[in-house]
Amino acid sequence: MFTRTESFQEFIRYYPVVSVIVSIHILLYLLTSLPIFPNSTIMQQLSGVNFYIWQGEIWRLVTPIFLHSGFSHVLFNSFSLVLFGPALERILGSLRFTWIYLITGISANVATLLIEPVTYIHLGASGAIFGLFGMYISLNVFRKHLLSKDNRQLITTIAVISIIMTFFQPNINVISHLFGFLSGFLIGALSLRKRT
Protein backbone atom coordinates (compact mmCIF):
# COMPACT_ATOMS: atom_id res chain seq x y z
CA MET A 1 0.00 0.00 0.00
CA PHE A 2 2.83 2.40 0.87
CA THR A 3 5.33 0.78 -1.52
CA ARG A 4 5.47 2.44 -4.92
CA THR A 5 5.85 -0.01 -7.81
CA GLU A 6 4.21 2.03 -10.58
CA SER A 7 6.13 3.52 -13.47
CA PHE A 8 6.31 7.32 -13.63
CA GLN A 9 3.51 7.44 -16.22
CA GLU A 10 1.34 5.04 -14.22
CA PHE A 11 1.83 7.06 -11.05
CA ILE A 12 0.65 10.24 -12.79
CA ARG A 13 -2.36 8.43 -14.27
CA TYR A 14 -3.39 6.67 -11.05
CA TYR A 15 -2.73 9.57 -8.64
CA PRO A 16 -3.28 12.83 -10.54
CA VAL A 17 -3.82 15.04 -7.48
CA VAL A 18 -0.68 13.88 -5.68
CA SER A 19 1.22 14.34 -8.95
CA VAL A 20 -0.06 17.89 -9.43
CA ILE A 21 0.70 18.90 -5.83
CA VAL A 22 4.26 17.55 -5.99
CA SER A 23 4.73 19.32 -9.33
CA ILE A 24 3.62 22.60 -7.75
CA HIS A 25 6.08 22.01 -4.88
CA ILE A 26 8.93 21.51 -7.33
CA LEU A 27 7.92 24.42 -9.58
CA LEU A 28 7.67 26.87 -6.67
CA TYR A 29 10.93 25.59 -5.22
CA LEU A 30 12.68 26.27 -8.54
CA LEU A 31 11.04 29.68 -8.88
CA THR A 32 12.20 30.65 -5.38
CA SER A 33 15.69 29.14 -5.69
CA LEU A 34 17.04 29.81 -9.16
CA PRO A 35 18.53 33.30 -9.53
CA ILE A 36 16.91 33.83 -12.94
CA PHE A 37 13.52 34.29 -11.27
CA PRO A 38 12.40 37.04 -8.85
CA ASN A 39 12.64 34.47 -6.05
CA SER A 40 12.59 36.88 -3.11
CA THR A 41 9.45 38.56 -4.46
CA ILE A 42 7.66 35.23 -4.87
CA MET A 43 8.61 34.18 -1.35
CA GLN A 44 7.53 37.53 0.10
CA GLN A 45 4.17 37.43 -1.68
CA LEU A 46 3.23 33.79 -0.98
CA SER A 47 4.64 32.89 2.44
CA GLY A 48 2.43 32.86 5.50
CA VAL A 49 3.08 36.09 7.36
CA ASN A 50 0.58 36.47 10.17
CA PHE A 51 0.77 40.26 10.14
CA TYR A 52 -0.16 40.45 6.45
CA ILE A 53 -2.93 37.90 6.85
CA TRP A 54 -4.44 40.03 9.61
CA GLN A 55 -4.16 42.96 7.20
CA GLY A 56 -6.40 41.11 4.72
CA GLU A 57 -4.01 39.08 2.56
CA ILE A 58 -6.13 35.97 2.98
CA TRP A 59 -4.43 34.04 0.15
CA ARG A 60 -1.52 33.55 2.57
CA LEU A 61 -3.62 30.92 4.34
CA VAL A 62 -3.43 28.80 1.17
CA THR A 63 -0.18 29.54 -0.67
CA PRO A 64 2.21 28.49 2.16
CA ILE A 65 0.89 24.91 1.78
CA PHE A 66 2.81 24.68 -1.50
CA LEU A 67 5.88 26.76 -0.64
CA HIS A 68 9.11 25.50 0.98
CA SER A 69 12.19 27.08 2.46
CA GLY A 70 14.90 24.86 0.99
CA PHE A 71 15.79 21.67 -0.83
CA SER A 72 15.57 19.35 2.21
CA HIS A 73 12.22 20.90 3.17
CA VAL A 74 10.61 20.39 -0.25
CA LEU A 75 12.21 16.95 -0.63
CA PHE A 76 10.95 15.65 2.71
CA ASN A 77 7.40 16.96 2.29
CA SER A 78 7.12 15.85 -1.34
CA PHE A 79 8.51 12.41 -0.49
CA SER A 80 6.00 12.11 2.38
CA LEU A 81 3.17 13.03 0.02
CA VAL A 82 4.32 10.51 -2.61
CA LEU A 83 4.54 7.84 0.08
CA PHE A 84 1.29 8.44 1.96
CA GLY A 85 -0.93 10.34 -0.47
CA PRO A 86 -1.64 7.74 -3.19
CA ALA A 87 -3.47 5.24 -0.98
CA LEU A 88 -5.77 7.97 0.35
CA GLU A 89 -6.37 9.36 -3.12
CA ARG A 90 -7.39 5.88 -4.24
CA ILE A 91 -9.63 5.28 -1.20
CA LEU A 92 -11.29 8.71 -1.12
CA GLY A 93 -11.24 9.64 -4.80
CA SER A 94 -9.34 12.54 -6.32
CA LEU A 95 -11.89 15.29 -5.62
CA ARG A 96 -12.42 14.38 -1.99
CA PHE A 97 -8.69 13.93 -1.46
CA THR A 98 -8.08 17.42 -2.87
CA TRP A 99 -10.59 19.01 -0.52
CA ILE A 100 -9.24 17.20 2.52
CA TYR A 101 -5.66 18.17 1.66
CA LEU A 102 -6.60 21.83 1.22
CA ILE A 103 -8.94 22.05 4.21
CA THR A 104 -6.44 20.47 6.60
CA GLY A 105 -3.62 22.66 5.29
CA ILE A 106 -5.73 25.80 5.62
CA SER A 107 -6.92 24.74 9.09
CA ALA A 108 -3.29 24.35 10.16
CA ASN A 109 -2.52 27.85 8.87
CA VAL A 110 -5.60 29.37 10.53
CA ALA A 111 -4.54 27.82 13.85
CA THR A 112 -1.05 29.22 13.31
CA LEU A 113 -2.56 32.65 12.67
CA LEU A 114 -4.69 32.54 15.82
CA ILE A 115 -2.11 31.08 18.20
CA GLU A 116 1.30 32.28 17.04
CA PRO A 117 2.48 35.92 17.32
CA VAL A 118 1.54 38.46 14.67
CA THR A 119 5.20 38.50 13.53
CA TYR A 120 5.24 34.73 12.88
CA ILE A 121 6.18 33.55 9.36
CA HIS A 122 5.38 30.02 8.16
CA LEU A 123 5.43 27.88 5.03
CA GLY A 124 5.41 24.22 4.03
CA ALA A 125 3.05 21.35 3.28
CA SER A 126 3.47 19.58 6.61
CA GLY A 127 0.16 20.80 8.07
CA ALA A 128 -1.70 19.21 5.15
CA ILE A 129 0.45 16.07 5.32
CA PHE A 130 -0.35 15.72 9.01
CA GLY A 131 -3.97 16.17 7.94
CA LEU A 132 -3.53 13.02 5.85
CA PHE A 133 -2.18 11.22 8.92
CA GLY A 134 -5.28 12.32 10.82
CA MET A 135 -7.50 10.99 8.05
CA TYR A 136 -5.65 7.66 8.16
CA ILE A 137 -6.27 7.41 11.91
CA SER A 138 -9.97 8.06 11.26
CA LEU A 139 -9.92 5.23 8.73
CA ASN A 140 -8.33 3.03 11.41
CA VAL A 141 -11.12 3.88 13.81
CA PHE A 142 -14.21 4.09 11.61
CA ARG A 143 -13.47 2.07 8.44
CA LYS A 144 -10.92 -0.57 9.41
CA HIS A 145 -11.89 -2.80 6.50
CA LEU A 146 -10.37 -0.30 4.04
CA LEU A 147 -6.86 -0.96 5.37
CA SER A 148 -5.09 -4.22 6.13
CA LYS A 149 -4.03 -4.89 9.71
CA ASP A 150 -0.36 -4.44 8.80
CA ASN A 151 -1.02 -1.13 7.08
CA ARG A 152 -3.16 0.09 10.00
CA GLN A 153 -0.33 -0.69 12.41
CA LEU A 154 2.26 0.90 10.15
CA ILE A 155 0.42 4.17 9.58
CA THR A 156 -0.51 4.45 13.27
CA THR A 157 3.13 3.97 14.27
CA ILE A 158 4.35 6.52 11.71
CA ALA A 159 1.68 9.05 12.75
CA VAL A 160 2.54 8.70 16.46
CA ILE A 161 6.28 8.96 15.85
CA SER A 162 5.75 11.99 13.58
CA ILE A 163 3.70 13.78 16.23
CA ILE A 164 6.27 13.02 18.94
CA MET A 165 9.16 14.18 16.72
CA THR A 166 7.31 17.45 16.12
CA PHE A 167 8.24 18.50 19.65
CA PHE A 168 11.93 17.65 19.33
CA GLN A 169 12.97 19.12 15.97
CA PRO A 170 14.01 22.75 15.58
CA ASN A 171 12.21 25.24 13.33
CA ILE A 172 8.99 23.20 13.26
CA ASN A 173 5.56 24.80 13.25
CA VAL A 174 4.15 22.63 16.04
CA ILE A 175 0.73 24.30 15.86
CA SER A 176 0.47 23.50 12.15
CA HIS A 177 1.33 19.84 12.66
CA LEU A 178 -1.08 19.35 15.56
CA PHE A 179 -4.03 21.20 14.04
CA GLY A 180 -3.45 19.67 10.62
CA PHE A 181 -3.61 16.24 12.22
CA LEU A 182 -6.64 17.16 14.35
CA SER A 183 -8.58 18.60 11.41
CA GLY A 184 -7.82 15.50 9.30
CA PHE A 185 -9.06 13.25 12.08
CA LEU A 186 -12.21 15.31 12.64
CA ILE A 187 -13.04 15.45 8.93
CA GLY A 188 -12.65 11.68 8.86
CA ALA A 189 -14.73 11.22 11.98
CA LEU A 190 -17.56 13.29 10.51
CA SER A 191 -17.46 11.82 7.02
CA LEU A 192 -16.51 8.18 7.63
CA ARG A 193 -18.72 7.22 10.56
CA LYS A 194 -21.41 4.82 9.54
CA ARG A 195 -24.86 6.32 9.74
CA THR A 196 -27.12 4.52 12.22
Image (cartoon, rainbow, N blue to C red):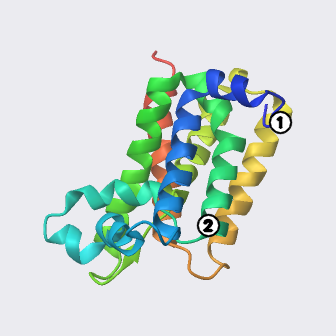
Q: Characterize the local packing of mark 2: few (<14), some (14-19) or many (20 or more) Cα atoms within 10 angstroms.
A: some
* Nearer to the camera, 133 or 137: 133
Kindly identify which numbered label has been placed on residue 160.
none
Q: Which residue is mark 2?
A: 73
Q: Is residue 144 visible?
A: yes
Q: Secondary structure at mark 2?
A: helix
Quadrant for the N terminus, please: top right
Residue furthest left as drawn = 55
Q: Which residue is mark 1?
A: 3
Q: Characterize the local packing of mark 1: few (<14), some (14-19) or many (20 or more) Cα atoms within 10 angstroms.
A: few
Q: Which residue shows up at 43% across the image and 52% down it? A: 105
Residue furthest front as drawn = 36
Q: Secondary structure at mark 1?
A: loop
Q: Is residue 24 left or right of residue 76?
A: left
Percent coordinates x, y for residue 144 in the rendering: 69, 27
* Nearer to the camera, 159 or 22: 22
Q: Which residue shows up at 52% across the image and 71% down it? A: 69
Q: Closer to the observer: label 2 or label 1? A: 2
Q: Earlier in the sequence, mark 2 or mark 1?
A: 1
Q: Which residue shows up at 45% across the image and 37% down it? A: 100
**Quadrant of the rendered image containing residue 111:** bottom left
Percent coordinates x, y for residue 104 in the rendering: 43, 48
Q: Is residue 189 visible?
A: no
Q: CA distance from mark 2 to mark 1?
A: 22 Å
Q: Which residue shows up at 55% across the image and 24% down it? A: 92
